Amino acid sequence: MKSAHLPLRVSIGAYFLNSGLGKRTLEGTAAEGLHGMAVAAMPQLGQLEPTRFAKLLSYSEIALGAALIAPFVPAPLVGLGLTAFGAGLVQLYLKTPGMREPGSIRPTQQGAGLAKDVWLVGAGLTLVLEGLTHGRRRG
């Protein structure tokens, strides 16, 4: 891991680890609420039972957090994972009713929490692009 990536990867990785660990035991109404919001944006997730969805999301966040912190995981690879996860959250923001001002991309008060996840896409793409272009400079 490049030392310049350290602040970005550790801060985002710790955030994901914490989030994933917090979802490990979600059941009942909490899992149903999380699942319902995801299904509204991505109907194919309706095939999963809510508790199973919560556990898979938890494991995904833990794995991504660990990969971000692990110094041996290449920047482009962890960047792809971060970009994909962030893109899913942006899709959730764009498709969930009430998250945006009518006819606009601007968030409502309710949508501000999801709208901010666009930074994950930016951070992920930065890791991918910097990792790919850094390899070219060497060659």
Image (cartoon, rainbow, N blue to C red):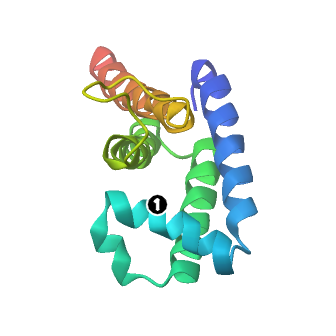
Image: 24 above or below 10: below
Tell me residue 35's x, y (percent): 49, 69
Image position, residue 118 (x, y; %): 43, 30
Quarter of the image for the N terminus: give it: top right
Type of amino acid at the residue the image marks with label 1: Met
**Is residue 120 rendered to the left or right of residue 42?**
right
Determine which quarter of the picture holds residue 34. Answer: bottom right
Q: Residue furthest front?
A: 102
Q: What is the quadrant of the C terminus in the image?
A: top left
Judged left or right of residue 43, residue 37 is right
Query: Dot 1, how many residues are within 10 Å of its Cα: few (below 14), some (14-19), or many (20+)?
Result: some
**Residue drawn where x is 57% and y is 67% of the image:** 33
For the question of whether residue 71 can be seen, the reply is no
Instruction: Please determine whether, in this image, residue 76 is positioned above or below residue 85.
Output: above
Q: Which residue is mark 1?
A: 37
Q: Is residue 107 visible?
A: yes
Of residues 57 and 80, the one drawn nearer to the viewer in this rendering: 57
Position of residue 81 measured from the top left corner of the image (x, y, whole percent): 42, 48
Q: Is residue 106 above or below residue 89?
A: above
Q: Quadrant of residue 130?
A: top left
- Which percent across, then down, holds residue 10? 68, 35
Which residue is drawn at the image coordinates 69% and 32% (left, top)?
11
Q: Residue at x 43, y 61 (%)?
A: 38
Q: Secondary structure at mark 1?
A: helix
- Comparing 55 with 92, the one in front is 92
